[in-house]
Amino acid sequence: MSLGQQTNPVAPRSTKHGWIPYVAGAVTFVVVLAGFGVIAGDWFLRNIEMRSLVIAIENSESTMSQTQDSVSSAFDAYGGLDNPVTADREALVTELANVAGYAQLSIADAGDQVASVLVMPWHLSILAAQDAYVTHNQAWQNYMERAAADPIEFTEPQAEVNDTFVAVEPALTAAVPQPALFDLVNRVAQIFIDGYPDPADETGGPTQDAGFESGAFASLLGHQIFLPMS
């Protein structure tokens, strides 16, 4: 290049909008991070809701189990009598009616606790599980109302109670968040471990819809005594 040749200086690179890619990247990062936060928060909320629902259901099941124990004790006491008379039978009927009347109130209270568990409207599986169990609890209330009016109801199979209980398991199992916190998988499974009758077992446990040996009381009535699943 000769000294006489003129040159055009190189224009400096414009930085007028150089910050845009950095801001866009930061905004994208914040949006993604917020999205993960929302997802994580919703997952945790589902676990919280499910824990509250399971606690309420456990309380309801415990109330039903206590009722069954009281009924079983009454039948056992009567069945253990050597020569029961009419007065003994009347005493048993009165005791069973009282058990049923008290149970109707306590089971209704437990059902209200289940129904009052707050669940977000978009958590459809948890809402379905809640509704399924409320229906089962109501079936028990209906059963106790009938038994309080006439304790011979304890000698009848309770299809409504058993069918609604069977319907609860798939709904409650499907509602458990994944992954689950608070030992929810085990606690949900525990509710149903002893709940189903063995078709081959004619004398199942107190939580099964199977025959209950009640001694002379069953003979007097000409019926088999039934205790439903909780």
Image (cartoon, rainbow, N blue to C red):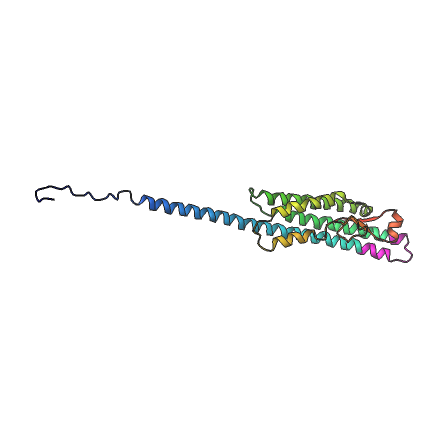
The magenta segment is: 73-89
Looking at the figure, which quarter contains the N terminus?
top left
- Residue 156, image x, y percentages: 81, 45
Q: Position of residue 193 (x, y in %)?
A: 70, 53
On screen, residue 89 versus residue 14, left or right, reads: right
Q: Find the residue positioned furthest to the front.
A: 1
User: Is 215 displayed left or right of 136 in the figure?
Assistant: right
- From the top left corner, tell me how far across and down residue 58 is, in percent: 66, 53
Q: Is residue 196 left or right of residue 47?
A: right
Most common secondary structure along the magenta stretch: helix
Front residue of 109 and 22: 22
| Residue 123 image-quadrant placement | top right
- In the image, residue 78 lies in the stretch drawn in magenta: yes
Identified at 60% across, 52% down, the residue is 51
Question: What residue appears at the point 84 percent right and 57 percent down from the top-left corner?
Answer: 77
Q: Residue furthest left?
A: 4
Residue drawn at x 83%, y 50% is 93
Question: Taking the image as drawn, is residue 103 in sight?
Answer: yes
Q: Nearer the viewer, residue 6 or 88?
A: 6
Q: Could you tell me how many numbered marks the image carries?
A: 0
Q: Residue at x 67, y 45 (%)?
A: 168
Q: Is residue 93 magenta?
A: no
Which of the pair 11/229 is nearer the observer?
11
Q: Quadrant of residue 28?
A: top left
Does any portion of residue 133 appear in the rendered image? no
